[in-house]
Amino acid sequence: MNVIDSSAWLEYFADTDRADFFADAIEDSDHLIVPSICLYEVFKKVLRERGEDAAIRIISVMSFGRIVDLDASLALEAARHSLPLADSIIYSTALRFGATLWTQDSHFEHISGVRYFPK
């Protein structure tokens, strides 16, 4: 199972030179877990930069994975980590499903269960 951090989704959708780091995990939708906070972060950024049509198209691709809502239990699990709010939720989602977290966010550099690709 794989969880993709919001910044990695944005690299993938922008087709940057870093997109290949995350493509295999993203395109394996049968093993893809998508924290709902990633939907929020990606939609908000794409909406602001490229408009609503592009944002909706991107969210439809993300929805091929299993969307995981933030519930009370996950919120309390996330609060135990010394990471920023969204990162804590994303990491806790990965832990809950025994998934690998794919990211380029330096907050995750030395955390187990994370595939970190430095910028």
Image: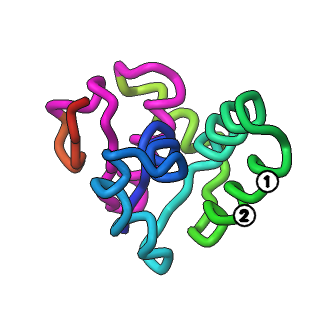
Residue lying farthest to the right in this orientation: 52
28 left or right of 105?
Answer: right
Q: Look at the image and say whether residue 85 sits in the magenta stretch.
A: yes
- The reply to whether the magenta stretch includes residue 96 is yes
* Viewer-closest of 12 and 37: 12
Q: How many marks?
A: 2
* Residue 13 falls left or right of residue 19: right
For label 1, the residue is 56
Q: Position of residue 94 (x, y in %)?
A: 39, 52
Q: Residue furthest bottom?
A: 30
The kind of residue on which mark 2 rests is Ser
* Colour setup of the view: rainbow
Q: Is residue 33 above or below residue 83?
A: below
Badge 1: how crowded within 10 Å, few (<14), some, or many (20+)? some
The residue segment tinted magenta is 82-110
Which residue appears at 55% of the width and 56% of the height? 34
Q: Secondary structure at mark 2?
A: helix
Q: Cα distance, mark 1 to mark 2? A: 6 Å
Q: Position of residue 117 (x, y in %)?
A: 22, 40
Residue at image coords 32%, 46%: 17
Residue 62: x and y in percent read 61, 60
Quarter of the rendering occupied by the C terminus: top left
Q: Is residue 86 above or below residue 64?
A: above
**Quadrant housing the N terminus:** bottom left
* Pointers 1 and 2 in contact (C-beta within 8 Å): yes
Q: Is residue 96 left or right of residue 67?
A: left
Secondary element at tag 1: helix
According to the picture, the residue beneath numbered tag 2 turns out to be 60
Considering depth in this image, is 103 or 69 the residue closer to the camera?
A: 103
Please name the amino acid that badge 1 sits on.
Ile
